[in-house]
Each structure stands twice: as C-alpha cells, then as structure tokens.
Amino acid sequence: MTIEGILGRKLGMSQVFEPDGSAVPVTVIEALPCTVVQVKTKDRDGYEAVQVGFGTRKRVNSPLRGHMGKLGQFRYLREFGVENIGEWEAGKKVGAEIFEAGDIVDVSGVTKGRGFAGVMKRHGFHGGPKTHGQSDRDRAPGSIGAGTDPGRVIKGTKMGGHMGTGSATVKNLRVMRCDSAKGILMVKGAVPGNEGVLLRVRRTKRGVVK
C-alpha cells in the first residue's frame, strides 16, 4: 500500500535530541488517519489517484454530503497519487504509518499573512543610498521602469504589496520521529503557515539535498 502522501495539521515547533546530545529543531505535525473518499481510475477519470478526507466540519452542503456519503463530514478533500489503484477502496484509512524515521518529505502549506509589505521585506531589496541628500529613500524601490520606451511599468515588476497567505513548499525535510499510534510526525526544520494550518506531507520526488 503505497501512497504519495497524507494530510496533516501543524501543531507547532519543538526540539529532539540526537544520541550525541545535539538539539535538532522540529515541526510537530498532527497526522491523524485520513479516510479515502473516492478512488479515481484511468478508465473513468483518465488518471489514477485517491481522494482523501481530513478534519471535520459541522455543516456540509447537499452536493458534498452526497459525495462523502456516510464516510464522514470532512473539512478538507485532497488527492494523492498511488502505485496500485486496485489496493484502494472508499472508507480505507491511511495515516502516519506510511512514514518512518529517516524518510525525506516535502511539506506544503499556506504561508503566514504579513499584510502590506514594502519591497525590502517582501523581495529583499537593499533600499536607496543613505547619503547624498537621499533623506526619504531609505526603503524605497528606486526606478520601476524605463523612460519613453516602453513608457509603462512591465508586468511582474517587484513592488510593495500583500505578502503571505500563498501556497509554499519546503522540500527535503527529514522525518525525525513517527508515532503512528498517536498520529504524530516530527520533521526537521520549519514548515509554512501558522499553527493549525493544513499541511500536505509527501515523499520527495527530487534528489535529496544532504
């Protein structure tokens, strides 16, 4: 039973100690069992995947109630790829047991909202000169375009604006602890989002960075 990943919830950060006594910062992820809501096959849907449900909600509209049936009232529905689609059926549970200490994973989530931010905080600009009469240019972006040609600001120019609340993925995080009985994963380092945010934990597909 091999699935690409599972859903979880960020609980916060802590630390674990290695045998040599060194402290390793970890993110604690609540990885309670997800329930398979739908199995997608190549004949019917054009691709193979399983849709899993995670979390609970009090109210569900009629289309979702019909879709989830008696499996539960899930807050989140997401799809993951699987190797052998014949092993999966609606109602099956999958959780932290698919991982073990030492595995390398990619963790995706919604980043923290930072409100309106300037170019120095949002894009890492160094600001204007601190001398030569530049009394109000310390944190300004400087020129945002050319002159007569093209006579406009190019799309995608880095400027101040709303920062955060976007999807982000942190790759190549090592699983430090895995307690499938309690539904807890601990991964080395930080992951996107505030405490309580939904996380997608998947096995990495790219080369591992040592």
Image (cartoon, rainbow, N blue to C red):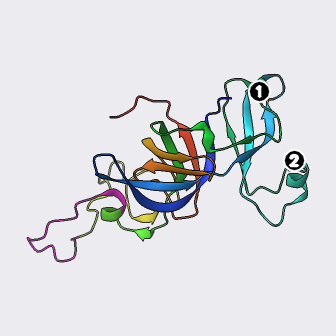
In magenta segment, residue 131? yes
Residue placed furthest toward the left: 132
In magenta segment, residue 129? yes
State the image quarter where residue 29 is shown: bottom right
Look at mark 1 in the image and give the residue it sits on. Answer: 87
- The residue nearer to you, when weighing 193 against 159, is 193
Q: Which mark is residue 43?
A: none
**What residue do we see at 49% from left, 50% from top?**
186
State the image quarter where residue 197 is shown: bottom right
Q: Quadrant of the N terminus?
A: top right
Q: Which residues are magenta?
A: 122-138
Q: Earlier in the sequence, mark 1 or mark 2?
A: 2
Q: Which mark is residue 67?
A: 2
Give left or right: position of 42 versus 139: right
Q: Is residue 171 visible?
A: no
Cα separation, mark 1 vs mark 2, equals 21 Å
Q: Quadrant of the C terminus?
A: top left
| Mark 2 residue crowding within 10 angstroms, few (<14) / some (14–19) / many (20+) | few
Q: Characterize the magenta stretch by its predominant secondary structure.
A: loop
In this rendering, is residue 156 above or below 44?
Answer: below
**What residue do we see at 73% from left, 44% from top?**
52
Estimate the x, y position of residue 141 in percent, counting from the top left: 29, 63
